[in-house]
Image (tube, coloured by chain):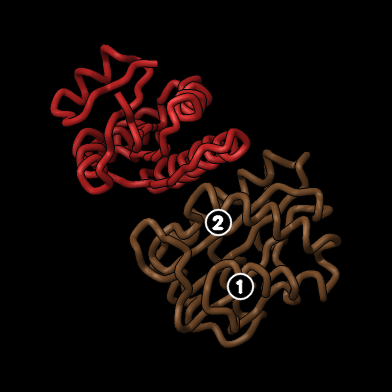
């Protein structure tokens, strides 16, 4: 299956500096941003699906990265959103460190294979120290998109 | 015997039928499931040589496959209300597993091929549960 995660990320789904300081507030802020930009049809249902996962696992994968995610029919297609927190947010990461880079992934219930593949590709990409540094230092949404596009294989 | 924290170790040649069994075990036992995918360097080098591919290419594919397996387990676990924690590491399988067992205070490890894994994990400090 061919899947480019860069094609799932739109500039209007990017928050360069998120205001929230804790994880549920951050998820709410990201989802509200996506609803405002018409990327999500049902914000409440989406938040409920994300919160269900947050209660059952740590989506903080370490090295300052968190990937909250859910399969929910609140979205019509596989979508990606990005937010950056200079101060960091506690996502109960496996290494105990705060998350500065947050990627949110959602897909409809029916697109499980694409969803799993997108999570795998993104997790692999974000294990690269150089990519994390570029994302931390990017100035604009278009830079974020370009970093993802250039570095995904 | 109560196992609060259970470790499932996966590799690229793991028998994937253990994945739903591990989730069901944790659901029934009320355990938290730690899932660790280990990329073994020796095996990557051997696979690259056998398939005449670059080590980097095989490593990339293995890492992506590892994350896929981890997220598949997690998706099933969430459906079943089982708490999970996902990990991917590179190194020597028994050493990495033992490090995780100590670091996270694991109570038991789940394996499929009990005899083979008993040999691999001969120094495992916790009970090994064969599914």
Please indicate whether residue B11 sits to the left or right of residue A53 in the image: left
User: Quick check: A35 above or below A48?
Assistant: below
- Name the residue tied to disc 1: A25
Which structural element holds mark 1? Answer: helix
Which residue corresponds to the image point at 34% horizontal and 40% vertical from the top-left? Answer: B39
Q: Residue B121: where, in percent of width, then height?
A: 20, 26
User: Does residue B54 appear in the picture of this structure?
Assistant: yes
Q: Residue A134: where, in percent of width, then height?
A: 48, 77
Frontmost of labels 1 and 2 is 1
Visual hue assigned to chain A: brown
Q: Residue B30's image quarter? A: top left
Which residue corresponds to the image point at 33% horizontal and 47% vertical from the top-left? Answer: B89
**Residue toward you, B25 or B116:** B25
Please indicate whether residue B1 sits to the left or right of residue B82 in the image: left
Which residue corresponds to the image point at 35% horizontal and 63% vertical from the top-left? Answer: A96
Q: Residue B51: where, in percent of width, then height?
A: 41, 30
Please indicate whether residue A61 sits to the left or right of residue A24 in the image: left
- Image quadrant holding the C terminus of chain A, namely bottom right
- Image quadrant holding the N terminus of chain A, namely top right
User: Quick check: A90 above or below B103?
Assistant: below
User: Quick check: B127 above or below A12?
Assistant: above
Which structural element holds mark 2? Answer: helix
User: Quick check: B22 above or below B64?
Assistant: above
Seen from this angle, which residue lies furthest front? B1
Q: Are marks 1 and 2 on the same chain?
A: yes
User: Does residue B16 appear in the picture of this structure?
Assistant: no
- Name the residue tied to disc 2: A122
Dot 1 or dot 2, earlier in sequence = 1
Visual hue assigned to chain B: red
């Amino acid at each position: 299956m061919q899947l480019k995660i860069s094609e799932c990320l739109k500039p209007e789904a990017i928050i360069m500096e998120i205001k929230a300081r804790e994880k549920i507030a951050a998820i709410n802020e990201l989802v509200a941003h996506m609803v405002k930009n018409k990327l999500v049809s049902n914000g409440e249902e989406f938040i409920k699906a994300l919160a269900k996962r947050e209660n059952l696992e740590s989506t903080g994968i370490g090295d300052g990265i968190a990937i909250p995610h859910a399969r929910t029919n609140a979205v019509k297609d596989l979508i990606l959103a990005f937010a950056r927190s200079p101060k960091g947010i506690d996502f109960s990461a496996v290494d105990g460190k705060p998350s500065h880079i947050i990627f949110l992934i959602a897909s409809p219930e029916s697109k499980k294979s694409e969803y799993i593949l997108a999570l795998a590709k993104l997790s692999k990409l974000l294990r690269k120290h150089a990519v994390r540094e570029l994302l931390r230092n990017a100035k604009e949404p278009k830079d974020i998109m370009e970093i993802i596009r250039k570095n995904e294989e | 015997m109560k196992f609060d924290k259970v470790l499932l170790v996966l590799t690229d040649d793991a028998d994937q039928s253990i994945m739903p069994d591990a989730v069901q075990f944790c659901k029934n036992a009320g355990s938290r499931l730690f899932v660790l995918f280990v990329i073994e360097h020796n095996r990557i080098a051997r696979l690259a040589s056998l398939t005449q591919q670059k080590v980097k290419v095989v490593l990339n594919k293995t890492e992506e496959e590892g994350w896929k397996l981890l997220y598949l387990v997690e998706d099933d676990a969430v459906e079943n209300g089982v708490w999970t924690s996902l990990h991917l590491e590179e190194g020597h399988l028994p050493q990495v597993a033992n490090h995780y067992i100590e670091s996270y205070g694991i109570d038991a490890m789940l394996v499929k091929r009990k005899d083979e894994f008993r040999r691999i994990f001969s120094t495992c400090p916790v009970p090994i549960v064969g599914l």
